[in-house]
Image (spheres, rainbow, N blue to C red):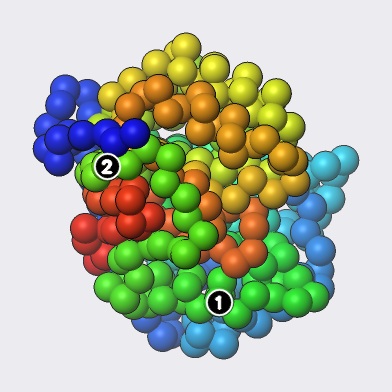
Amino acid sequence: MTARVPLDALGTAGALTPLTRPRRLRAGDRVAVVAPSGHIEPDRLRRGVARLESWELEVTVGRHVLARTRHHAGSDEQRLADVQEAWCDPAVVGVFCARGGSGAAQLVDRLDWAAMGDGGPKVLVGFSDITVLHEAVAHHLGLVSLFGPMPAAAALAGPDPDQATAEHLRRTLFEPDSVQVLGDPATVCHVAGVARGVTVGGTLALLANTVGTAESRRASGGIAVLEDIAEPAYRIDSMLTQLLRTGWFDGVAGVVLGSWVGCGDGAVDTVAERLAPLGVPLVSGLPFGHGVPQLTVPLGVEAELDAAQGTLTMLRPALS
């Protein structure tokens, strides 16, 4: 099956438009590590901070990062304070979320977005539960962000960290011109074709959960990038149905599927079967999300998807 999507899809009414690109990082820059979601393991945090410092970054860690409540890294007030302080500090140029889990959604309505805007453009890095913050930063601040590995998560700071994952993140942050083409030999084409659109998406469950909120952005004219972890096929089917019924996919230009770790047999087939009838270019197997290795995917950047080649090419570097 081959889809023919006009390359001027971004010109359609209501379509996503490219977001403002924060500047790339340089040696000596100050970045902050915060924990808006789940508990943080101290050893992983230490290794992740050391990784960032090895890139000649000055790292500040939120005051409450190691706090614990039942299933969050501290109370809502503690997590809120760390995110707010990091973003409002004009000396901080990048905010790294330590890990995912749950809890970011509780912060969105309480963050002072006007004050955060006054703090200047910053790079947000994270994935999984951080999908909620990616959506909020795009909606409230109009900024490109990076759906990528986190400093207290397994790929960067586990017992056996993945060097390819770390290097791709480093290059995206410091040398974004060198990683504009994302691809992998294992990528599978489900619907051939070429399309252009602004990258949007993240972890499927979080996107489904945010439908109906102010921050939820439909994929019209965009390239939807989707992944998830530990969700059985029947739940994936339900979440996709929710997004389809609410119009989230209306006008989408193309779809790229990442890793579906622990989702079991049939997960990718379920997604492909539900989305192929959209008739837009569709590929699976690009290694982003919860798997290892893990590519860093910019959100809010105009990109070209060539499904037959299995490549997603950023038409401009993710960071300026």
Give the secondary structure at mark 1.
helix
Residue 198 - label: none
**Amino acid marked by disc 2:** Gly
**Amino acid marked by disc 1:** Ala
Local crowd size for mark 1, using a 10 Å CA cut-off: few (<14), some (14–19), many (≥20): some
Residue at far right of view: 70
Which quadrant of the view contains residue 72? top right
Q: Taking 86 as reference, is 62 left or right?
A: right
Which quadrant of the view contains residue 311? bottom left
Residue 28 locus on image (x, y percent): 43, 85
* Quarter that holds the C terminus: bottom left
At x 50% / y 78%, what residue is drawn?
Answer: 167
Q: Taking 139 as reference, is 53 left or right?
A: right
Measure the alpha-carbon separation of dots 2 and 1: 29 Å
For marks 2 and 1, the one nearer the N-term is 1
Q: Nearer the viewer, mark 2 or mark 1?
A: 2
Question: 91 above or below 221?
Answer: below
Q: Taking 2 as reference, is 211 left or right?
A: right
Please tell me which residue lies in front, 61 or 126: 126
- Residue contact between numbered discs 2 and 1, judged by CB atoms under 8 Å: no
Residue 80 locus on image (x, y percent): 62, 44
Please tell me which residue lies in front, 244 or 189: 189
At x 67% / y 67%, what residue is drawn?
Answer: 155
Give the secondary structure at mark 2.
loop
At x 31% / y 76%, what residue is drawn?
Answer: 178
Residue tagged 2: 193
Question: 113 above or below 46?
Answer: above
* Quarter that holds the N terminus: top left
- Is residue 55 at least partly visible in the picture? yes
Residue 67 locus on image (x, y percent): 80, 54
Residue tagged 1: 164
Residue at far top of view: 245
